[in-house]
Image (spheres, rainbow, N blue to C red):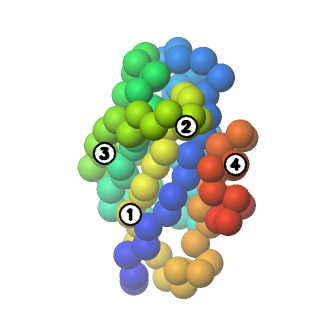
Amino acid sequence: MAVRAVRGAVQLERDEAGHMDEQVGALLTAVLERNGLTADDLISIWFTATPDLHSDFPAAAARKIGIVDVPLICAQELDIEGAMPRVVRILAHVESDRPRSDVAHVYLGAAAALRKDIAQ
């Protein structure tokens, strides 16, 4: 079994904890589904949030959908002028037999514009 990295992002419509839970939960669910993974395949997840998000930790959404025994960490994204606002990004390390070229990176909604080269 190989270790693979899966990227993803979602742009929030507003900075509210419930909305963040919903959107980050949808992102994580899509990453798992599109890659044929379960929570047991997760090694760790890094979350970043743009500096305009203050309502909650993105990792809290993972706990709410049942990802409870996986190391999670949150960090603030760089504050770059002109960057897309209200974005949560993830970098998930997983165990998978998929070749690297078959890993499905997930960019939901407007966040698809961030990585048109790999968004699926």
In three-dimensional space, the C-alpha distance between marks 4 and 2, rounded to whole angstroms, equals 11 Å
What residue did someone put label 4 on?
A: 113
Q: Amino acid at mark 4?
A: Ala
**Quick one: SS at disc 3?**
strand
Type of amino acid at the residue the image marks with label 1? His
Q: Tag 1 or tag 3, which sits nearer the N-term?
A: 3
Residue at image location 51% in from the left, 58% down from the top: 7
- Please tell me which of labels 3 and 2 falls first in the chain: 3
Dot in front, 4 or 3: 4
Q: Which mark is residue 72?
A: 3
Q: Is residue 26 left or right of residue 80?
A: right
User: In the rendered structure, which disc, 1 or 4, sits on the residue that comes first in sequence?
Assistant: 1
Q: Which mark is residue 93?
A: 1
Q: Is 2 situated left or right of 9 in this image?
A: left
User: Position of 73 compared to 59: left or right?
Assistant: left
How many residues crowd mark 2 within 10 Å: few (<14), some (14–19), many (20+)? few
Check if mark 1's residue and mark 2's residue have beta carbons within 8 Å. Answer: no
Q: CA distance from mark 4 to mark 3?
A: 26 Å
| Foreground tag (4 vs 2) | 2
- In three-dimensional space, the C-alpha distance between marks 1 and 4, rounded to whole angstroms, equals 23 Å
From the viewer's perspective, is residue 113 above or below residue 35? above
Give the answer, above or below, for where 92 lies relative to 112.
Answer: below
What is the spatial separation of the Cα atoms under label 1 and label 2, in whole angstroms?
Answer: 25 Å
Q: What amino acid is at disc 3?
A: Leu
